[in-house]
Amino acid sequence: MSNIRMSQEELRFISILEGLTGALALDCIWDKTKSLVIFVVRRNDTGKVIGRGGTTIRRLREHFQKNIDIVEYSERPEVFVTNTLAPAKTQNVEIHEKSGKKTIVVTVIPQERGKAIGKNGRNIQRSRLLMKRHFGVNNVIIQSPP
């Protein structure tokens, strides 16, 4: 995780998030094309960012004038990939390494597949981006059980 580079604007976003919520943000990605900010927060800090009834996250969205995604960090890639695909519930996570390339295969029940992929592939794209950035994973694949 030490090779993560952030822009001045992303560092400013982290400072604002931490000041308003008390949560510790470990990473921030600003996708200007989608007007989206993704925060990776310390384990158990997701609730601080969301707030009771979602009030804090709504306030943050108004403050930033952007959509905000929150992902809870884990040092274990199997747990982190599950967090990146939330709210989809995963059944199984397998890590495959071949020729120096890591691939994570996530099994979800058919009813959860749409949630895991997200509208226009938003959730799977977020997952691939964060897994590459934090664990050097080359691909994340969603599959249903046989």
Image (spheres, rainbow, N blue to C red):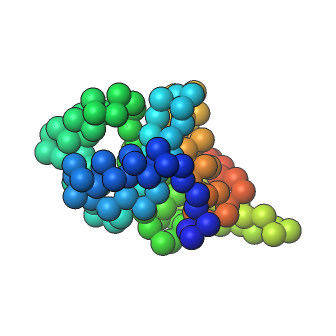
Tell me: 87 left or right of 46.
Answer: right
The number of numbered badges drawn on the structure is 0
Asked where in the image residue 102 lies, by quadrant, the reply is bottom right
Q: Residue at x 57, y 28 (%)?
A: 33
Residue 9: give x, y in percent of width and height: 47, 44
Residue drawn at x 34%, y 34% is 64
Residue 22 in sight in this render? yes
For residue 101, side relative to residue 128 (left or right): right
Measured from the top left, where is residue 112 in percent x and y? Answer: 47, 40
Q: Nearer the viewer, residue 89 or 98?
A: 98
Name the residue rendered at 13%, 45% in the picture: 52
**Does residue 112 appear left or right of residue 42 in this picture?**
right
Question: The N terminus appears in which quarter of the rendering?
Answer: bottom right
Q: Is residue 91 visible?
A: no
Outermost residue, front side: 8
Q: Is 121 above or below relative to 143?
A: above
Q: Residue 48: x percent and y percent? A: 22, 54
Q: Nearer the viewer, residue 116 or 84?
A: 84
Q: Nearer the viewer, residue 110 or 61?
A: 61
Residue 29 image position (x, y, % from top left): 51, 46
The extreme right residue here reads 99
